[in-house]
Amino acid sequence: MPSLAATSPPNKNIAEELAKKQREIAVSEFFERNRQVLGYDSPTKALITAVKEGVENALDACEEADVLPELLVEIRKNSDTEFTVAIEDNGPGIVKKQVPLVFAKLLYGSRFFALRATRGQQGLGISGAIMYGQITTGKPAVIRSKTANDDVAYQIQLRIDTRKNKPDIVKEEFVSWERVSGTRVEIALKGRYIGGKQSVPEYIKSTAIVNPHARITYRPPEGEPVLFERATEELPRKTVEIKPHPYGIELGTLLSMAKETESIRVSSFLQGDFSRISPRVAKEICEIALVPGEMKPKNLTLDQAKAILEAVKKVKIMAPESDCLSPIGERLIKRGMKNVLGNMRPEFYAPPLTREPAVYSGHPFQVEVGIVFGGDLPADQPIEVLRFANRVPLLYQAGACAATQAVANVDWRRYGLEQRGGQGLPYGPAIVLVHVASVKVPYTSEAKEALAAIPEMLEELELALKESGRRLKTHLNKKERKAKTREKFDIVQKVLPQIAAKSAAVVGKKVPSLDGTITKIMGVVWVESKTEFTAGIHHVTVEMHNFTPAGKKFNLHVLLPRGATLAKAEPKPYEVKEDGKVSWELKRIGSVERETVVFEVAGLDKDELDDPELFASGISPELVIGAEPLPGDWDLNYHEFESEEEAPKAEEPEGEVDYDEAEEALPDD
Amino acid sequence: MTKKKAAATPGASKGSLKAVDELYDIASEIYDQLKDGQIPKMVLPLRTKGNIRFDTRSQVWKYGALKGARTAKKLRGALMLLRTMYVLEFIKGMIDQNKSSTLREMYYISEGWDLAKFHAQDESNLLAEDLEIITECMREDFRLRPEESGASVIGNLTIEETTRNGENRRINCRDDVGDAGYTIPYNVEKEKVRFRGHDAKFVMAIESGGMFDRLVENGFDEESKCILVHLKGQPSRSTRRLLKRLNEELKLPISTFTDCDPWSFRIHASVAYGAIKTAHISEYLATPTAEFVGITPSDIVNYEMPTDGLTPRDVGALHAEQTDPRFNDKFWKEEIETMLRLNKKAEQQGLAKYGLDYVTDTYLPEKLGELGIF
């Protein structure tokens, strides 16, 4: 392949750079025989698969070029059984020479060899869709691409010659296109368009959730176009290529790597072609395997390779680095969910959770979970579980998927959902999002539709789900307590004054003061916060009203989210810590009196301080509504604190029977 | 409202004057509780079947010792207390102006009470009863009347009624009334209704209008010298009070004749034993010597009556009656068990199977004979 001198500015040459990496891997009648595995076994599925391949390609291409993706997905109905799928992106475009090669050769792509957590892993993708379209309609695919270097776009009609595994250009031309750069693929295929679950709209919606940096316009065959606006301008972290970790290596791969390596000695082969093998570790492996470190790698026998793999298991090797992963991140999961699911008006988004990276068979992976709850979500149905792997929605085979299994294994009853016997999918108004990011996502089959239930994976999933469940439960508890206290508030603010007024009128005396009665009914310190957001600053006012019969003195704390800076605070806090904890020591608040704390926070987005996390210490937790007790182990990582849920608060002892609650089984008259 | 006697209001009965004082006391107690910084509450005897006990002296069921509290700690309790204050004011107003209102009207008047509005008719009925219990007055003293019309009476009984314009009118319940009989007013106390002569040997209280008309048409009241009272379903207070007075003052035995189903049994129970919700005034309303004539489950068998199957609700009602202390005697225990076993119910008009005259020629003479009334 001709190499091009990099004289033009870097991003114009991205296309050329990528071109260099594209290597050929043969196989093509593979497709004909493996349609199910590739996702083309039914017209309905075929339509979705074609869309998926195009969308994933487009997202990957944009991200590699550091471009915020802007996608257009169109589906046009040509007849009852035939549709045209079109996907357009604003990526770097593909160099003219490469266009037919990229789209018409199966298993041809830049992403095959390097172990990176990208979406389209096999490189089969879009060619498969073109192949399917060709077989079912006889029509060629239409591809248009323009790089920043070009003045006009290059457009071809393309077929695949299946026997020779070569592209067959039916027509080529140059067309003018307003885009600076980008690619558009149009494929006519036999398909069936449905709505509801496992449909194109559902796929696009899910994709939008886990790709909040993308802007996706979807034009369905009928009806109005739908726009998923982006929720952030941040691109996902670029994943770094890593070399394979020795734990995950298969025998055959080891041998082929040994044959192809440029190293002339086994010890440097081990150090250079694998991650996390230092000279000392390489030496140790060779010693245990009884393989001389100086021998040539390509002379390794089958038995020696086996011995090396055995030795690897015995040697202590560091876990792989995880910057090969691109988790979505807690903040963006919330943003993505809010952006897309917002119209269902859920009442609560549990703070999403991104676990620390873990390892299975030498491959790093990371689990993320988000839960939305309540609001308009239907309450009397099983919860919805949205599954993702490397930011790709998994629509099929839910029953076989480790994510579903993990959800079913957790006892959700302790987190506020209904679940028969503590097993199986729980019922309730909730949507659970599960995302696994990995260099090598373990699937149950070649079809890559469901996650394999590997023990490490299941464990991480369950831990993440339980932690999220706890966060949900904490919210529900808070809500319940607030509702109970809201009732008391209503009594105290509305009904009681009227009772006082009327009884005073009847007996002809002055209206009595209600303070004593109020403190007896409320019996709590009521903490409430109000937040205003102007010019990038959050102005927070915290009011504490002492509705107890005696004076109270305690400390107030707030936990600010990451990235926040405390600008002002009145009164002055006695401590401001790095992890975001701000603490005030309050003056004694007399009975029926109130105290106010005001502070300003900079550096956050508008909705990041909707519900500031307030804590109160130095006072019994039952006496406070609106501020949680300070966890005793504040200085440990809060997330690691995997305690059981706190014992349920004892109900106020009712010495007497409530007259109005005592009801007769059957009406008497 | 101040604590001066309402002497200036004409027509304020002794009962009403007492009511005024008692109501003032209720308001006063709430006021004092608030002044003391307490949570206002009212303590009342629980009005459930778990708290009725048989009083051997009066032979009726009264409330026991269990109490419940209505407190402002809960929103529901607070609202009921507020309603109580409004109702106090309302009643005082009526007494002052010598007016009265139906319970239904009070329910509608509460629409203007904002938060204290009643959400259902039952709520206002219950509150009126609560006040009766606390003040030991009758709701008539509060100038509150129910909606239901009272019973119809046919028989040779002469009644003197003081009508709304103060006249005393004599009415004979056979000669002076039409086929529908004399309808008793809502207040059957001596100040309104007096007995002025009869020739009856007993009183029969009948559930269904059809059977009442049958007996009237067959001249049963003349033949057997009885006073027929049409209960019109679950009998109103005034109906029960009338039966009690007929029994007490005229020494007439009372018998009840209803359909055979659990709801009808409760009709008899409220006549004979007292209703659970009005156990505080059972002495006034219940006639403990009232006999149940039929239709009994045994009658279904013995007279081979046409039947219907029991619905699940019926079965539930029977089970509830098995734990109702008022039905806790040999007779009722056996009959209810029989009924559950038969799984059938029957209507009193089913006796027409044997002809229109069967009930008066055969059934009633037989059954009343067994009871020693005939």
Image (spheres, grey):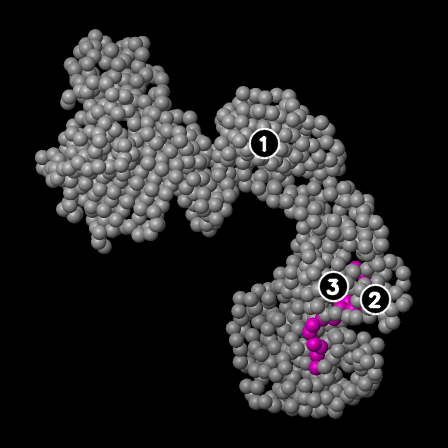
Q: Amino acid at mark 2?
A: Asp
In the displayed orientation, state which residue is furthest to the top: A294
In this rendered view, identify the residue nearer to me: B247 or A555.
Answer: A555
Q: Does the CB distance between marks 2 and 1 fall below 8 Å?
A: no
**Which x, y percent locates residue B357?**
61, 90
Residue B330 is left or right of residue A459, and the answer is: right
Residue B173 is left or right of residue A78, and the answer is: right
* Residue indicated by mark 3: B128
Residue A366 makes an appearance in the image: yes
Q: Secondary structure at mark 1?
A: strand
**Which x, y percent locates residue B374?**
71, 85
**Which x, y percent locates residue A555?**
66, 27
* Residue indicated by mark 1: A539
In the displayed orientation, state which residue is furthest to the left: A164
Real-space Cα separation, disc 1 to disc 3, in angstroms: 53 Å
Foreground mark, 2 or 1, reads 1
Name the residue at 16% across, 34% down: A100
* Residue indicated by mark 2: B96
Q: Are marks 2 and 3 on the same chain?
A: yes
Q: Chain of mark 1?
A: A
Please tell me in which quadrant of the rendered image residue A342 appears.
Answer: top left
